[in-house]
Amino acid sequence: MPPALADLRRLVHDAARAELLPRFADVARHVKTDGSLVTEADHAMQQRMQRELAVRWPAYAFLGEEMGDDEQERLTREAGRGLWCLDPLDGTSNFAAGIPFFAVSLALLLDGRPMLGLVYDPVRDECFTARRGEGAQLNGAVLGASGLQPTEMKRAIACVDFKRLEKPLAASLGAQPPYGSQRNFGSSSLEWCWLADGRFHLYLHGGQKLWDYAAGWLILSEAGGYSTTLDGEEVFALGLAPRSVVAARDSRLYSSWQTWLRAQRGAPQA
């Protein structure tokens, strides 16, 4: 049987408060070969989670962001018996700069699909969770949209990661945005969850890795939200290739958002 979400919440909560918060804004760091930051906290959190998950649920394999590419590829090919997928510190650049927006993201994949998803924000002590087919929760309570939900894009708040978008699309969004205002927070897994809770209304990202979206995608889906890639495919795919994200919590906003983006990219209308 898959683990109980309450057990996972306790495990991740205790690990994050022991390994991440004491190191926050006071980290030893270096640059990975792809130019991204990795800190002591990334490694400490991943090692602790790998060890504790193996003790409690030894039947499942473990995939972490800080593993080597070859090992990650092997694990995604052999995911049939069950696979934990962990981003030990999603928002490393924020963490290293002292910006309090980062999270731990953990998903359990069974038969190549997310069964459980958990995203924990240790700064706010907020834990977003979902089990496939059973809805999404925030700190154990049913996840509901917070704040007023607009019915038109021009009144919506969008979260947009411009860095990974096609340049013409990024230019169009900058010059003539269809939404009311825009944010970019810097932690993909937490952005999925904030969208699921209605803290902003539209989402666009040019490329996320499996550990960035596996848990958040399930949480948004179970909260009743909508998402595809920019090319109209399902976001979740068991592999290491980056996936773009177009998403919204509300079906009408989602449809309007898709239509606008297709028009800007010159894609055929659905």
Image (cartoon, helix red, strand yellow):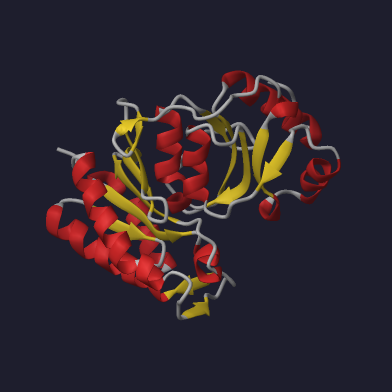
> Where is 114 relative to 148, above or below?
below
User: Residue at the location (27% across, 45% down)?
Assistant: 80
Q: Please state the horizontal and vertical placement of residue 107, each as a whole percent of the image.
A: 34, 46
Tally of numbered discs:
0
Q: In which quarter of the image is the N terminus?
A: top left
Residue 29 visible from this viewpoint: yes
Q: Please state the horizontal and vertical placement of residue 202, each as a whole percent of the image.
A: 62, 34
Front residue of 119/147: it is 147
Front residue of 214/223: it is 223
Residue 58 visible from this viewpoint: no
Front residue of 56/237: it is 56
> Where is 89 relative to 7, above or below?
below
Q: In which quarter of the image is the C terminus?
A: top right
User: Residue at the location (49% across, 65% down)?
Assistant: 95
User: Residue at the location (55% across, 36% down)?
Assistant: 199
Question: Quarter-wise, where is residue 22 in the image?
Answer: bottom left
Q: Please state the horizontal and vertical placement of residue 191, each as a whole percent of the image.
A: 52, 45
Q: Please state the horizontal and vertical placement of residue 136, each as a whole percent of the image.
A: 36, 31
Question: Quarter-wise, where is residue 11 in the image?
Answer: bottom left
Question: Quarter-wise, where is residue 176 in the image?
Answer: top right
Front residue of 40/141: it is 141
Q: Hey, which residue is sitting farthest right in the picture?
A: 175
User: Residue at the location (66% across, 46% down)?
Assistant: 183
> Where is 159 relative to 267, above or below?
below
Does residue 193 appear to the left or right of 183 in the view shown? left
